[in-house]
Image (cartoon, grey):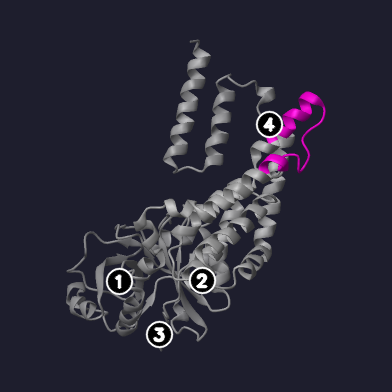
Amino acid sequence: MTAQQVFLFVLLLAVFGMLLWGRVRYDLVAFAALVVATVGGAVPTEQAFVGFGHPATVIIALVLVVSRGLANSGAVEMIARYVIRGTLSLGSHIGIIAAVGAALSGLMNNVAALALLMPVDMEAAAKAKRSPALTLMPLSFATILGGMVTLIGTPPNIVVATFRGEALGEAFGMFDFAAVGLVVALVGILFVALVGWRLLPVERRQYNVREELQDLEGYVAEARVLEDSAIAGERLRDLYPMAEEHDVALLGLVRAGKRLPGFARRETVRAGDFVVIEGAAAAMEKFVGTAGLEYASTGGKTAVLSDNQILLEVVVPEGARIQGRSAMDLRLAYRQGVMLLGVSRQGRPFRDRVRRLEIEAGDILLLSGPEDRLPEVASWLGCLPLADRGLQLLQRD
């Protein structure tokens, strides 16, 4: 092997490793690899950015723009909710939602189609009191199958059509793939609706993610100590009986922007400190009210919460806007008027400030905001709301 070949082989392995690692955005990894290959001489300088002007690249970008427009319009969710508005049998549910997903993915990016239909599918599953594990996988397969029907349904179709046009002078048309793709999609949808879901393990069929998430006890939040707080001047360890009474745990103190070492049991609580608490959402809210605290995300002039403030629990899926970022990065409270009160990370501890914590897929967030605005912001964040448990914010004078 020549030195150039070794260089490219090592570069490809490094790119593959970075993609598997998943800590760096895929587009940044790809662009960095292009720059390294160009600097290393593997790619001629004059050819480095030719791919950005290739018709296939432009078409794929335009499809993503159309997909985002459809997502932001809300029309897709409205149609999907209308189609599956009633409680259906499992086979009918899978058949209908799969057909909608396949049709959408023929006109937009299949990942976007799946992301749009997942909340609708989970809501319908919850109404029917069945596990969403039975319907989400068939929906995923259906969006993949639907993408094969049209030219813009999947990037490989666009690439093949473009190269055919360059080689033969005539590219594939919008529905030239339908003769084969439509048959495959219909057979695939029928299979997953009638047979495919039965192949899932029994324990997955009985598993209800919403019920498990409703049993959350592990939110971690921060609450500011006010001048007139009932616990100001007390040692943290002396507050343990109060915490036990409210079924919360005191994890430590934040002072001057820094988390004090350990659990800070012997530290005296001062005005301006932040008490780090862990517990269920309702239990934390009662403790904060009793102790005369205010949540860390609020400002000093908003200690008394208005009547239209509500709590909402959301789960962070893969690809959400907030994934890999913090509430501070998004300036959530300033831009959207919504506060991140707590984070549940499936029992795994963390020491970062809640507002500075880098959110991961699978995290459960406790948000507070205006009743008419909070669902919209949750959608903007790319998060999926959990079932309503009647959580309320207590008014503090």
Classify 10 Å Cα crowding around label 4: few (below 14), some (14-19), many (20 and above): few
Q: Is residue 175 magenta?
A: yes
Q: Of the numbered discs in the image, which one, if any, rests on residue 338?
A: 2
Picture coordinates of residue 212 (x, y %)?
35, 66
Residue at the image point whose x is 64% and y is 36% from the top: 156
Query: Secondary structure under badge 4?
Result: helix
Q: Nearer the viewer, residue 103 or 259?
A: 103
Labels 4 and 3: the sequence-earlier one: 4
- Residue drawn at the location 63% of the way across and 67% of the way down: 83
Which residue is label 1 attached to? 279
Work out whether 342 lies above or below 194: below
* Place of residue 65 in the rendered image (x, y in percent of width and height, measured from the top left): 69, 51
Q: Say whether disc 1 or disc 2 marks the residue closer to the N-terminus.
A: 1
Pointer 4 residue? 51
Q: Closer to the camera, 152 or 101?
A: 101
Q: Residue at x 59, y 72 (%)?
A: 85
Label 1 and label 3: CA atoms lie apart by 16 Å
Left or right of 235 in this view: 65 = right
